[in-house]
Image (cartoon, rainbow, N blue to C red):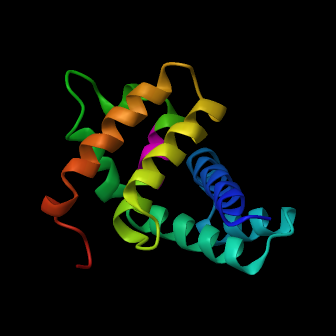
């Protein structure tokens, strides 16, 4: 499996895990274990999945705040859950996972939301991620 395909799979699995947390309120560690047991993943994919999933969970409040600050005349509760989770996950990737160029995170987020959400979602997600990208240097990042 190529590097980019395995990372796309890891992102999609991480999204499924984040969605599962939102719906079931199960422990993230249990959900991650369940996800990893369903697919035979190579070690690099497993590592990337774990890092993205765990950092997305750890930084949920921070990433939601970033998203909320970019909404104009819109309430965060009106955003489709999948769109919100993709935004959180890809912002986490842009900020906390150093070996992925931010522009790759943006395009991956757009492709994933096209697959799992509505037709309108991709331009919305692109707009928010692009806004975060242009403010990366000015962000006050937790733990940094």
Which residue is at 58% across, 38% downward?
111
The residue furthest front is 2
Image quadrant containing the N terminus: bottom right
Residue nearer the viewer, 31 or 15: 15
Image quadrant where residue 38 sits: bottom right
Magenta residues: mostly which secondary structure?
helix
Q: Position of residue 74 (x, y in %)?
A: 27, 23
Q: Position of residue 49 (x, y in %)?
A: 63, 67
Is 28 contained in the magenta span?
no
Image quadrant where residue 2 sits: bottom right
Side of 142 relative to 14 (left or right): left
Which residue is at 48% across, 29% downward?
122
Image quadrant containing the C terminus: bottom left
Side of 122 relative to 142 (left or right): right
| Residue 106 drawn above or below residue 99 | above
Q: Which contiguous range is marked in magenta?
A: 84-89
Q: Position of residue 83 (x, y in %)?
A: 49, 35
Side of 39 relative to 25 (left or right): right
Report the label total.
0
Side of 14 relative to 71 (left or right): right
The residue furthest left is 138
Residue nearer the viewer, 33 or 13: 13
Image quadrant where residue 29 sits: bottom right
Residue nearer the viewer, 2 or 80: 2
Which residue is at 43% across, 47% downward?
106
Q: Position of residue 84 (x, y in %)?
A: 45, 40
């Amino acid at each position: 499996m190529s590097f980019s395909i395995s990372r796309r799979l890891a992102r999609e699995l991480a999204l499924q895990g984040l969605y599962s947390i939102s719906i079931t309120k199960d422990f993230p560690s249990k959900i991650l274990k369940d996800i990893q047991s369903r697919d035979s993943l190579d070690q690099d994919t497993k590592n990337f999945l774990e890092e993205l999933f765990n950092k997305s969970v750890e930084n949920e409040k921070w990433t939601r705040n970033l998203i909320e600050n970019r909404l104009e005349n819109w309430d965060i509760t009106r955003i489709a859950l999948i769109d919100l989770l993709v935004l959180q996950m890809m912002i986490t990737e842009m900020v906390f996972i150093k070996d992925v160029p931010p522009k790759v995170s943006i395009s991956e987020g757009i492709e994933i939301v096209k697959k799992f959400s509505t037709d309108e979602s991709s331009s919305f997600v692109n707009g928010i991620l692009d806004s975060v990208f242009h403010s990366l240097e000015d962000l006050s990042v937790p733990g940094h």
